[in-house]
Image (spheres, helix red, strand yellow):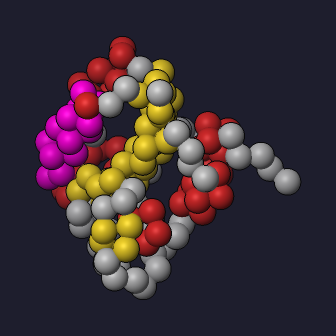
Amino acid sequence: MTDLLIISCSRTKKHLDNVPAIELYDGQAYRVIRKSGHNNVSILTISAKYGLIGENDRISYYDQLMTISRATELRDQVSSGILRILSQGHFQGIFVYLGSPYNLAISRDLIEYMDEHHSLQIASGSIGKRLHQLKEWLGVTER
């Protein structure tokens, strides 16, 4: 069994072309994920430009901020994509690490479905608190 991490893209990106998404994003959360080795964790990213992408989907540098209208526009595509992936895999736990307005890209119905069928944890609080919750979920120890 694997776990699923649903995370928003990061403003900080490396200026690279045609690389796996996990390598392009360089915000604090992505550094924590790479440090963890993310064994037995599948990662889905919600991107303002690309919508829902997997960690190994190849993308290039871009500069596009998520807005409320863009998140709303992506909601159906993102929610149906997550539901399709959930139906294909056997995920034990799901951790949702989204900032505002990225959380608007996932329908409330999907959140309720994930909560009913999986061990769901949604990061909350300040950025520092959410980052701490991510580290705990990934099993990254502080030094």
> Is 76 placed left or right of 39 in the picture?
left
Q: Main secondary structure of the magenta part?
A: helix
| Residue 51 seen in render | yes
As drawn, is 31 to the left or to the right of 87? Answer: right
Q: Position of residue 92 (x, y in %)?
A: 46, 24
Q: Residue at the far right: name it.
A: 143
In the rendered image, residue 83 lying in the magenta stretch gets the answer yes
Residue 95 is left or right of residue 72, and the answer is right
Q: Is residue 59 above or below residue 122?
A: below
Instruction: Identify the image quadrant of residue 78.
Output: top left
- Decide: is 60 above or below 92: below
Q: Residue at x 52, y 70 (%)?
A: 26
- The residue lying toward the viewer, choosing from 125 and 37, is 37
Q: What residue is shown at x 23% (from left), y 56% (from top)?
A: 51
**For residue 79, which quarter of the picture?**
top left
127 left or right of 102?
right
Residue 133's spot in the image, x, y percent?
63, 40
Do we see residue 96 in this rendering?
no
Q: Position of residue 16 (x, y in %)?
A: 40, 83
Please tell me which residue lies in front, 126 or 106.
Answer: 106
Q: Which residues are magenta?
A: 73-87
Residue 53 among magenta residues: no
Identified at 14% across, 42% down, the residue is 76
Foreground: 37 or 62?
A: 37
Q: Position of residue 113 (x, y in %)?
A: 29, 20
Residue occupying the point 31% across, 77% down: 18
Furthest toward the top, the residue is 116
